[in-house]
Image (spheres, rainbow, N blue to C red):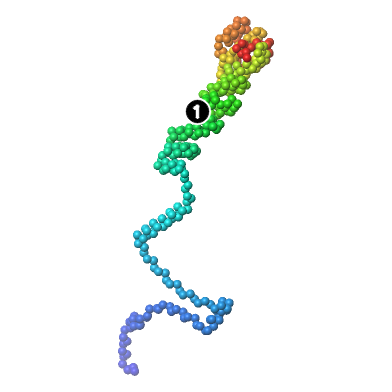
Amino acid sequence: ALSGGAAAPLPPVDGNQFFENLPPQAAPSAAAPPPPPKDDGMGFFDDLDANGGVPKPPEPPPAPPAPEPIAEAPEAIAARRAAEFRAAAAAAAAAEPAEIMDASDALVQRALVVGDYRGAVDACVAAGRHADALVLASVGGAELWEETRAAHIAANAQKPYMRVAKAVVSDDLGALVASRSLAKWRETLAILCTYAPAEEWGTLAGVLAGRLAAAGDAHAATLCNVCAGDVDAAVGHWLGALPPGKVAPSALHSVLEKAVVLTRATGQTTSAGLAQLAVSYAETLASQGRMEDALSYLDMVPDGGEAVTTLRDRIVRGGAGRLASSSAAAPAAYQAPAAYQAPAAYQA
C-alpha cells in the first residue's frame, strides 16, 4: 500500500543482465533419422503386385568398407616393376617370328655385329648373294664398293647387257666398240651417243666405221663417219660409191655439196678430202671456160693447200680477171659440165 510519504526510488536496471541470466542453450543435435516406414501389413502384397506375383528378393547385405591401402616398401616396388618388365620382354620375344638362318646368314650377321663390312661382303659373294654384297659394300668405302661391283660384273658376264654395263662403269667404251657384233652397229653407235665423252666421240665412231668398212658395209661406215664428223673418210666413201671410169658431173657435184655441208656442220673450214674434191671439180669447170665458177669453188677451201693455190694461179694467169670474193656458197645457176673423169685416188 502506498503511504502518504514519498515513493522509494527503483533500483537501477542493467539491460544485459536479462540475457546473462538466460540458461545456456544446448548445441543443436544432428538431424534425427527419418522414422522407418510404418508397416501396415500390406507391403508383402504390394511387392507381389509390383513383381508380377513373385515375392521380392531380400535386400543384399551392404558391402563391407574397402580396406585402407597399405604403403608399399620401395624394395617391393622395384621388385614388382622388374617382374613386370621381364614378363613383358618374354611376351614380346614370344610374339616375334623365329629367326631361321643358315650358315651363310650367320657369317654375315656375325661380321655385321662387329662392323666387319669386308667380311660380310665376302660371305655374301661366297654365297652368291651379289645384291646383298653391293648393299653392304656401299657403306664400306669406295675401294670395297669397286671391288664388289667388279666381282658382280664378272659373275654375270654371260648376260649381254652386262658387257655394256662393264664398259660404261669402267670407262672402257673402246673395248666395247672393238669387240661388239657388227650386226648391232646401230645400237653400238647409240651407246656412243649416250656415254662417250665429247673428246672421244669422233675417235670411237671412226673405229666403228673402220670395222664396218672392213666388213664391206660401206653405207653403215659412211653414216658412222658422218656422225664422227670425219669429212675425209665420208668423201672417200661417197666417191667410192660412184661408178668407175667416167663420172657424171652432176654426181660429182652432189658429192661436193654433201662434203661442204658436212664441213660446215662440224665447224671446220676445210679438209683434205674437200680440197681435193673442189680442185677436181674446179678443173672441170675451167676446162670448159667457166673460170669465175671455178674460182668460186676454190674459194670454198681457202686453206686447201698447194693444189688449190696452183690451180687458182693458173686460172688467174689464164685471164679470169680478179679473183672472186671468198664465198662458201656454190654459184646460184649451176650448169652441168661435160663428163668428168674421177681422180685416180678416188677410183673404187
* Residue 308: quarter of image: top right
User: Dot 1 corresponds to which residue?
Assistant: 171
- For badge 1, the amino acid type reads Asp
Q: Nearer the viewer, residue 265 or 81?
A: 81
Left or right for 85, reference 51: left
Residue pictured at 40% horizontal, 78% vertical: 29
Residue pictured at 35% horizontal, 81% vertical: 24
Q: Quadrant of the C terminus?
A: top right
Q: Nearer the viewer, residue 223 or 133?
A: 133
* Residue 104 vertical position relative to residue 76 in the rendered view, above or below: above
Residue pictured at 59% horizontal, 8% vertical: 311
Q: Quadrant of the N terminus?
A: bottom left
Residue 319 visible, this angle: yes
Q: Residues within 10 Å of mark 1 (few under 14, many from 20)?
A: few
Residue 295 visible, this angle: no
* Residue 179: quarter of image: top right
* Residue 111: quarter of image: top left
Residue 77 placement (x, y as % from top left): 37, 60
Residue 332 placement (x, y as % from top left): 66, 16
* Residue 3 vertical position relative to residue 113 in the rendered view, above or below: below
- Determine the secondary structure under disc 1: loop
Q: Nearer the viewer, residue 254 or 71?
A: 71
